[in-house]
Amino acid sequence: MERSGAALAERIAERRSGVGDPRALVGEMRRAVLLVPMAGDRLWTARMGGVRWIHGFTDEVALARFVRHHVPGDQPLEYATLLGARIVDEIVPALGEPAGLAVDVATEDGAMFFPPVVGIVPESAAVDAGEAPAAPEVRA
């Protein structure tokens, strides 16, 4: 069942305040429809800490905050609407390098990073594949 990003934003707020279940957060991310800005004909990504991060936003307000900081002038920004599960299950592995999902990166106290680890991305794309299983790690 697909859901708007509002439920994901609520789960992110819970985790950032120290409550909520990390697995429920990952599940909500997978069900959420995210707005993913485009850079030409590609998804907008940035490299940080050896990981390529795909940017996704829970709503147009969060996307607009990002645009104000990263797009010069009044240039329009194209974006795709993608299910979180599609991003982490299909797009991340296709990049061929460590990649994760960064949600609402321009939202003060509202960003969340879903790193390329088992439980978030497929094992073939996880940097910790082959290690002992643990609860998925999500970072604020």
Image (cartoon, helix red, strand yellow):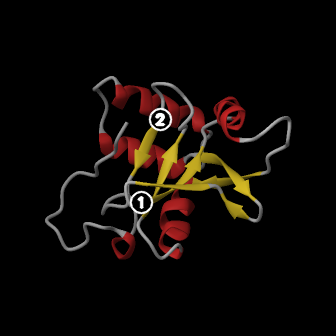
* Quadrant hosting residue 127: bottom left
Q: Secondary structure at mark 1?
A: strand
In the shown orientation, is residue 32 left or right of residue 12? right
Task: Report if residue 88 is visible in the image.
Answer: yes
Which residue is label 1 attached to?
51
Q: Residue at x 76, y 65 (%)?
A: 41
Q: Nearer the viewer, residue 5 or 130?
A: 130
Mark whose residue sits in front, 2 or 1: 1
Q: Disc 2 residue type?
A: Ala
Q: Amino acid at mark 1?
A: Val
Residue 2 in picture, x, y percent from top left: 60, 49
In this picture, residue 35 sits left or right of residue 84: right
Q: Residue at x 62, y 46 (%)?
A: 34
Residue at which label 2 appears = 111
- How many numbered dots are placed on residues in this image? 2
**Counting residues from the N terminus, which is met first, the one under dot 2 or under dot 1?**
1
Q: Nearer the viewer, residue 83 or 1?
A: 83
Q: How far across and how far down the image is residue 32, in percent?
A: 56, 46
Residue 138: quarter of image:
top left
In percent of width and height, residue 96 lies at 48, 76
Q: Nearer the viewer, residue 88 or 65?
A: 65
Task: From this view, report whether residue 93 is shown above or below residue 37.
Answer: below
How far apart are the alpha carbons under marks 2 and 1?
16 Å
Work out whether residue 1 can be spotted. Answer: no
Give the crowd class for mark 2: few <14, some 14-19, many >=20 residues within 10 Å.
some
Spot occupied by residue 22 in the image (x, y as percentages of width and height): 31, 42
- Seen at 64% across and 55% down, the residue is 44
